[in-house]
Amino acid sequence: MHADSAANVMTTMDWITFGIAVFSFVLSVYNFVETLVNNSKRLSVSVKHLCRENGHVIMLIEFTNRSQLGISITCGKLVGTAKKEVVFGETSRELFRYNSPEAKGKSSERTLTFPLHIDPLRSERVLLQTEHDLPDFSRNCRIVLGSSRGKLSKKLELPIAREGFVSLLEHLN
């Protein structure tokens, strides 16, 4: 009888070891999935205002990085329904960049080109001037961005384009 109880203790220890191994595996899978979700490219893009001025388009674009890693936007293009494209980024001139768009008394700094770095869990509003006028885009188009973390493509709804830079200044106030 003494030999049988020793065998049962060994089997119980084996089950406990197996349970600990399964629990550790489940925790490592959970940790992997959580890291993958938190570090994925989660960038939302919206065009807040469009205006046409002397054959150029000036866009107020807001980029919001909802990831826990920073991202740098290097270039981009708007793709219309008829596969017409308007490139911005390397060929664009940045007019103003707003730090913390929610803050009162928005400070601005002048830079000339991309890359635009967006810190984790932050937003940046950028006023960009394209080199060419937008063709007749429908309000729904696609934006394709080159970034430090790969290519991003998103559907985007454009606001109605207005004439003149003054309409944009009214929108900023």
Image (cartoon, grey):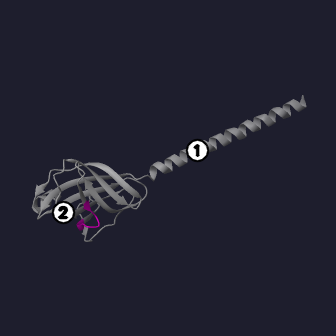
Total labels: the figure holds: 2
Question: Which residue is found at the position 48% from the left and 50% from the top?
Answer: 36
Rendering coords of residue 34 (x, y %): 50, 47
Determine whether the residue tagged by mark 2 lies in a helix, strand or loop. Answer: loop
Q: Earlier in the sequence, mark 2 or mark 1?
A: 1
Question: What mark, if any, has residue 70 been given in the picture?
Answer: none
Quarter of the C terminus within the rendering: bottom left
Are there few (<14), some (14-19), or many (20+) residues within 10 Å of tag 1?
A: few
Which amino acid type corresponds to the residue marked 1 in the rendered image? Answer: Leu
Quarter of the N terminus within the rendering: top right
Q: Which one is nearer the viewer's eye here, 158 or 61?
A: 158
Question: What mark, if any, has residue 27 been given in the picture?
Answer: 1
Q: Is residue 16 magenta?
A: no
- In this rendering, is residue 106 above or below 31? below
Q: Which one is nearer the viewer's eye here, 22 or 160?
A: 160
Question: Which residue is found at the position 85% from the left and 31% from the top?
Answer: 5
Rendering coords of residue 88 (x, y %): 26, 62
SS majority, magenta: strand
Residue at mark 2: 132
Question: Which residue is found at the position 90% from the left and 31% from the top?
Answer: 2
Q: Is residue 94 magenta?
A: yes
Which amino acid type corresponds to the residue marked 2 in the rendered image? Answer: His
For the record, the magenta segment spans: 87-96
- In this rendering, is residue 27 above or below 67? above
